[in-house]
Amino acid sequence: MMATFSNIHSKDGSKARFWKKESKVPGSSNSTSPKKSRHREKDSFEAFESKTEDAWDDGDDDMFLMPNMKMSLKDVHSTAMEVINNHSLRVQTANGTEDRNAADIHTGDAVPPLNPHHHRLGGPGMGVRMNSGNGTPNSNTKITPLRFANMPVPDREVAKIEKFESLLSQNNLDLGDLRKLSWSGIPKQVRPTCWKILSGYLPASLDRRQPTLERKRKEYFSFIDQYFDTRHQEIHQDTFRQIHIDIPRMNPLIPIFQQPVVQELFERILYIWAIRHPASGYVQGINDLVTPFFVVFLSQYIDNDIELDNCDLTQLPKERLETIEADSFWCMSKLLDGIQDNYTFAQPGIQKKVNELKNLIKRIDVDLHNHLERQNVEFLQFSFRWMNNLLTRELPLRCTIRLWDTYLCEPDGFASFHLYVCAAFLSRFSADLKREKDFQGLMLLLQNLPTHHWGNEEIGLMLAEAYKLKYMFADAPSHVKKR
């Protein structure tokens, strides 16, 4: 089938090309759309465009980069975000809330109602923090003092923590036992050590752990000395510029991520990784994958809940920040080693996973699949970000950390199990999605799924459903491939 595109004028007068329902999605199977769809007076996206009357302009995002097209699909992502953001603002105004300032609308400070018809009031990605401004605290923001960790242990977790400590104290840790114990969640008190071992950063041998930490931390800072000064050289300045732009946008609802000391730490981690991995370099989305590691390793030293507190990390001793930085770099590197084809040219790993998700949903929820098709919603339009960012922008940070407890225990968890988690995640909102009767409503919901109130219980249910799907389909790949 030939791909078809509609021309869209950007602010600078150039034309962007947005692929429509009839187009062939890169990586998808060949299928023939009914002829009547080609003769519609106006397709859903054109209707959406005419209703919103937005100016479509090029953004900084490079999240879409597909082959055999005359333009990078970064325009698709950035312009779709513009439409959804501007539409959300109009809906707010239409409902008599125009006095609410834009920052409040984007950050979603108030918890929106769970009524499916009210989900449009927030900006896209309520689960985390996309396009929400820089989130920099103003001069009146109260700084929360650091509470250095005493690691208080809730009574109900004492027995579980004792099991972890017993395992971790063994001279030769059985990784299989650690994975089994960790799959259902790791207590905060032992999570930093468990993550380092499960990610492959630390060895199972107890005697080798401390020497390994010392050696790898020293090695990371030797990379800093060797490479970081090259960030302003012409060959590397575009990479560093993109990193510098992305970091303030990363977690604007969490004040500590707007602190210069934290942003500089992330800049070093991402730049050094990009320099050492020239096959992919820096790709937007990689920045989000540092955050969970940073937060978990920070929890070794402070007891603040960083999703709520505006704690000042300049109070933390420099050597501890350096330890967190080096450990975050190495664990992120281990994670990316398993999914690097997600970030190489044309991002083939993501294309493949998006297509597999589409085919899997057709197997497990054909009504939802057909509903999305009838309304001209392509999986690439919403699930690209799910694969690119591993759902970090769809879920609160506390939920991402709990989710990663399980990913680190699954064989190829970030590469393989993530597909089934995405399928369970989409199915969770199947009823809400099927109540939406047009492209506009579906896209607004898919970009603003109501997960801000989620906790361990919701993640546990989603993981159980994902495990069931894996059990049913992982050993029968023909079931997830469209014949």
Image: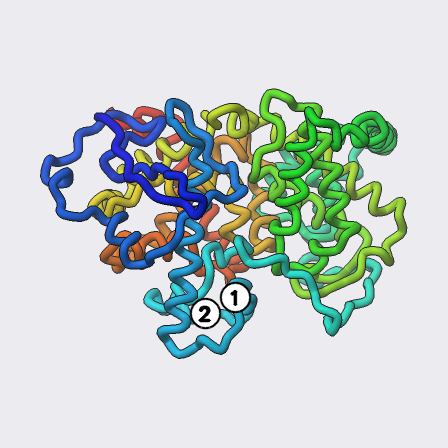
On-image quarter of the N terminus: top left
Q: In the visual, does 345 lie left or right of 221?
A: left
SS label for mark 2: loop
The residues bearing labels 1 and 2 have C-alpha atoms spaced at a distance of 8 Å
- Quarter residue 198 falls in: top right
Q: Which residue is drawn at 46% across and 35% down?
A: 64
Colour scheme in use = rainbow
Q: What element carries label 1?
A: loop
**Image location (x, y in percent) of residue 417:** 48, 35
**Amino acid beneath label 1:** Gly
Q: Nearer the viewer, mark 1 or mark 2?
A: 1
Q: Residue at x 82, y 63 (%)?
A: 147
* Direction from residue 405 to residue 90 in the image, left or right: left
Q: Is 230 on the left or on the right of 358, as rendered? A: right
Q: Residue 108 carries which label?
A: 1
Q: Residue at x 27, y 48 (%)?
A: 45
Residues at marks 1 and 2 touching, judged by CB atoms closer than 8 Å: yes
Residues packed near mark 1 inside 10 Å, few (<14), some (14 to 19) or many (20 plus): many
Q: Which amino acid does label 2 sit on?
A: Pro
Q: Can residue 167 be seen?
A: no
In the picture of the structure, the residue carrying the numbered disc 2 is 112
Residue 424 position (above or below residue 454): above
